[in-house]
Image (tube, helix red, strand yellow):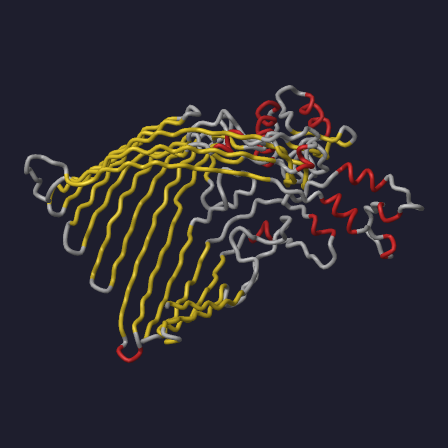
């Protein structure tokens, strides 16, 4: 169902109604205290324009794979025969996007004035691949792979991968891999029609920080996102205890990212600073003067995708070209740690403890060729869509207990703290009872810890079958998320917005 478009013609008809003779057809846009002045359901249904919109996607795949030992006339390496897999794949991908009736008519209140159209796209993909497993020694294995994909829409890629596994002892294994990969833009990334909706933008030239209309669609100029990754790691297994440590480094080129109005604003402000020598931050109290903004808007170098109110240059009415782009570069380096320990306490049952943790050393990104390279690791990254909120540390601690048919599992989730760089203004200031978190710029986004727990009983004999039931809770201790000046009023991307939730599950096998 199409939401939040609203039919401007239905609004106009309701505003121009015959108040005396056809009151039920009238539209009152104001808050009412007397229900006699309220709108009828029929009028609100017409204005809401909750029409059906359709997206149809289909994918047909043919796979041919041959695998087994490579026939080498009886020759084998010290570790055994060489194994191989070769194959071919053909994919046929299609989509059709049919907007709602109000969008087809170009009659949306939140949206553009152009009529939208039905769009469709299709492509064929041919892929060829080969994989080799080469047991050089009984404790040394080399893995080689290569894949070639060709798209009828013009994209193509050849991606090799190499791997090495060495069992140095019966308790220590060393690992190393390096390989290329790619992501082709989807058909909707390429051909989606231009549509409009609401998006928040914080102006770097003035006080505006609010919802505005944002319009964007497919980008037929997208190319493949490519990456080169490498990993080094080791595994230690000592009876009931094991630990794995892996270093990862991935370099992305032409990363496919959605660009929003805030990204465009950041780029426009950076171009303004480069062109004029302005040294301010763009935050409240450190922004250009009105005369500087007026001169920049008139400058051909400014971004004309920002439509400002002719009567009030500080009001942004619309942002265009909020679509998908190929970002310049992204490089991520991180460490993954996983450890497990199991032990028994005789009549008290069996216990297991597991820890998974990730440390992000750096997350360098460049959203545009004219933008500086920025490290998003340890940042809230509110002003870009090229990188999400990226705490340096994330960790899960798993503790489990089993005795007979009973088991208990707990997961304690930890997310590191971050500095806050989101908006300072909030619409919630105008709602009664809301208190703006004044200190978030000083305290930042605080570290978050949350425990989930569950109890399961298995082996319940019932009606000739066997059942099990589980009761559990997410956010067991009902921790509240931190308040934020953002529109949602809280840090929803990293912290649990719902508070404690309790669930039960019953499974029956017969």
Left or right: residue 477 compared with residue 138: right
x and y, in percent, of residue 461 in the image: 37, 76
Q: Nearer the viewer, residue 388 or 504?
A: 504
x and y, in percent, of residue 122 in the image: 47, 29
Task: Tell me if residue 210 can be seen.
Answer: no
x and y, in percent, of residue 304 in the image: 65, 25
Q: Nearer the viewer, residue 390 or 472?
A: 472
Q: Residue at x 29, y 31 (%)?
A: 128
Q: Residue at x 13, y 47 (%)?
A: 139
Q: Residue at x 50, y 46 (%)?
A: 389
Q: Nearer the viewer, residue 310 or 380?
A: 310
Q: Quadrant of residue 130?
A: top left
Q: Nearer the viewer, residue 390 or 120?
A: 120
Q: Judge whether 407 appears above or below 388 on screen.
A: below
Name the outermost residue toward the left: 74
Q: Judge whether 168 appears above or below 206 on screen.
A: below
Left or right: residue 19 compared with residue 182: right
């Amino acid at each position: 169902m199409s939401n939040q478009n609203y039919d401007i013609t239905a609004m106009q008809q309701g505003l121009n109604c015959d108040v005396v003779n056809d009151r039920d057809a009238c539209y009152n846009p104001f808050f009412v205290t007397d229900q006699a002045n309220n709108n009828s359901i029929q009028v609100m249904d017409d204005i809401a324009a909750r029409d059906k919109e359709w997206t149809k996607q289909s994918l047909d795949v043919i796979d041919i794979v041959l695998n087994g030992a490579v026939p080498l006339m009886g020759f084998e390496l010290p570790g055994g025969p060489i194994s191989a897999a070769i194959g071919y794949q053909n994919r046929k991908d299609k989509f059709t996007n049919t907007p709602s009736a109000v969008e087809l008519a170009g009659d949306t209140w939140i949206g553009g004035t152009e009529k939208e159209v039905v769009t469709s796209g299709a492509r064929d993909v041919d892929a060829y691949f080969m994989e080799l497993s080469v047991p050089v020694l009984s404790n040394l294995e080399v893995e080689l792979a290569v894949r070639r994909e060709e798209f009828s829409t013009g994209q193509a890629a050849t991606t090799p991968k190499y791997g090495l596994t060495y069992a140095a002892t019966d308790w220590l294994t060393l690992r190393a891999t390096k390989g290329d990969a790619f992501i082709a833009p989807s058909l909707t990334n390429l051909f989606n029609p231009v549509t409009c909706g609401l998006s928040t933008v914080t102006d770097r030239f003035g006080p505006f920080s609010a919802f505005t209309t944002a319009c964007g669609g497919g980008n037929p100029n997208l190319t493949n996102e490519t990456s080169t990754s490498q990993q080094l790691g080791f595994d230690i297994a000592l009876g009931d205890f094991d630990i794995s440590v892996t270093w990862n480094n991935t370099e992305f080129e032409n990363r496919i990212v959605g660009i929003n109005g805030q990204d465009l604003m950041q780029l426009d402000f950076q171009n303004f600073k480069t062109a004029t020598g302005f040294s301010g931050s763009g935050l409240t109290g450190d922004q250009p003067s009105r005369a500087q903004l007026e001169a920049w808007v008139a400058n051909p170098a400014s971004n004309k995708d920002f439509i400002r109110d002719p009567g009030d240059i500080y009001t942004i009415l619309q942002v265009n070209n909020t679509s998908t782009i190929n970002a310049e570069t992204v490089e991520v380096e991180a460490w993954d740690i996983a450890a497990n320990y199991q032990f028994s306490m005789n009549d008290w049952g069996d216990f297991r403890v597991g820890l998974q943790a990730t440390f992000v050393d750096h997350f360098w990104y460049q959203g545009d060729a004219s933008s500086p390279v920025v490290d998003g690791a340890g940042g809230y990254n509110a002003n870009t869509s090229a990188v999400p909120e990226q705490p340096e540390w994330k960790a899960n601690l798993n503790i489990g207990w089993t005795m007979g048919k009973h088991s208990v599992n707990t997961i304690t989730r930890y997310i590191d703290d971050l500095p806050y760089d989101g908006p300072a203004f909030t619409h919630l200031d105008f709602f009664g009872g809301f208190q703006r978190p004044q200190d978030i710029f000083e305290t930042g986004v605080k570290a978050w810890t949350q425990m989930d727990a569950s109890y399961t009983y298995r082996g319940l004999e019932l009606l000739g079958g066997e059942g099990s039931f589980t009761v559990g809770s997410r956010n067991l201790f009902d921790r509240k998320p931190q308040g934020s000046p953002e529109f949602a009023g809280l840090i929803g991307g990293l912290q649990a917005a719902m508070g404690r939730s309790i669930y039960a599950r019953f499974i029956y096998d017969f």
